[in-house]
């Protein structure tokens, strides 16, 4: 799973969750022209430009958890997907099984404003 935008840490992604967001209603157009760009699903998400594609709108949020960093990423080109990454200084291996549940538990309160979301994919599963 490629990570979009520019993360603050250069640690590798050792676990991730891909969540499916509910379909947003189409905007009401009062004037002719293209619709406005979609807004990020959470207020905590901030613009996180993609250096190789300045037109791409990516939003991210990072939270430090000591030995690992939780990163939420939303791409306006895939508005129905929200990705959560666990970045840690673990090279060539996955997140230890004991810490996967801790990662998932850290993601849940951040997504509380959106309600329960279906998990489309994850690696590793708890």
Image: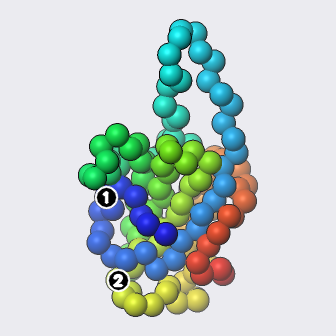
Is residue 19 found left or right of 83 in the rendered image?
A: right
Give the SS element for disc 1: loop
Residue 64 picture quarter: bottom left
On the rendered image, what quadrant is the C terminus found in?
Answer: bottom right
Residue 97 tag number: none
Residue 88 picture quarter: bottom left
Of circles 1 and 2, which is in front?
1
Q: Which residue reaches farthest top?
A: 31
Give the SS element for disc 2: loop
Seen in the picture, residue 24 relative to 28 is either above or below; the reply is below
Q: Earlier in the sequence, mark 1 or mark 2?
A: 1
Seen in the picture, residue 40 relative to 99 is either above or below; the reply is above
How many numbered dots are placed on residues in this image?
2
Q: Residue at x 45, y 90 (%)?
A: 93
Q: Residue at x 52, y 63 (%)?
A: 84
Q: How is the image coloured?
A: rainbow
Q: Nearer the viewer, residue 39 or 105?
A: 39
Seen in the picture, residue 65 relative to 92 is either above or below; the reply is above
Q: Nearer the viewer, residue 18 or 112?
A: 18
Q: Are marks 1 and 2 in contact (CB under 8 Å)?
A: no
Q: Residue at x 35, y 55 (%)?
A: 5
Q: Residue at x 44, y 66 (%)?
A: 2
Residue indicated by mark 1: 6
Residue 89 tag number: 2
Seen in the picture, residue 59 relative to 6 is either above or below; the reply is above
- Determine if residue 65 is in view: no
Residue 19, position as x, y percentages in the image: 63, 59
């Amino acid at each position: 799973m490629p990570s979009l935008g520019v993360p603050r840490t250069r640690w590798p992604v050792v676990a991730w969750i891909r969540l499916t967001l509910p379909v947003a209603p189409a905007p009401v157009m009062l004037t002719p022209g293209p619709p406005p760009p979609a807004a990020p699903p959470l207020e905590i998400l901030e613009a996180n430009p993609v250096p190789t594609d300045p037109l791409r709108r990516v939003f991210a949020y990072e939270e430090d958890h000591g030995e690992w960093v939780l990163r939420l990423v939303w791409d306006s080109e895939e508005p129905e997907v929200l990705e959560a990454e666990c970045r840690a200084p673990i090279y060539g291996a996955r997140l230890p099984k004991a810490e996967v549940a801790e990662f998932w538990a850290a993601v849940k309160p951040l997504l509380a404003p959106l309600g329960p979301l279906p998990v489309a994919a994850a690696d590793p599963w708890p």
